[in-house]
Amino acid sequence: MDEKLLNRIVADPQVCGGKPCIRGTRIPVAVILASLAEGMTAGEIIEHYPHLSPEDIRAALAYAAELSQEGVWKV
């Protein structure tokens, strides 16, 4: 996985309760992923959150892909 993308994701206990967010924002990765799952395009997400870039959207997806490789599943 592209480490540059993953470096865009941070988890700070002082920001959003420690949930993974896009570096330099208070936008949780989960918000981006949920928006994509609801059918929003990257462009639409960026319109709602102008601080985000296309690379931030890709970073959220890369982060989710990494987590899915860890085999932690709730069914």
Image (cartoon, rainbow, N blue to C red):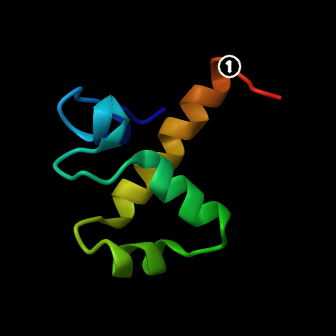
Who is closer to the viewer here, 70 or 49? Answer: 49
- Which quadrant holds residue 75? top right
Q: Would residue 39 appear left or right of 63 to someone viewing this image?
A: right
On the image, the x and y values in percent for residue 8 come to: 28, 42
In the rendered view, would you say 33 is above or below 7? below
Q: Quadrant of residue 20?
A: top left
Name of the residue lying farthest toward the front: 17
Residue at (36% x, 78% y) in the render: 48
Q: Is residue 64 left or right of residue 44?
A: right
Count of numbered circles on the image: 1
Asked whether residue 69 is in view, the answer is yes
Q: Is residue 2 left or right of residue 11?
A: right
Residue at x 66% of width, y 73% of height: 39
Is residue 10 visible in the rendered image? The answer is: no
Please give the name of the residue rendered at 53% of the width and 48% of the height, measured from the top-left corner: 61
Q: Which residue is the site of mark 1?
A: 72
Residue drawn where x is 29% and y is 65% of the image? 52
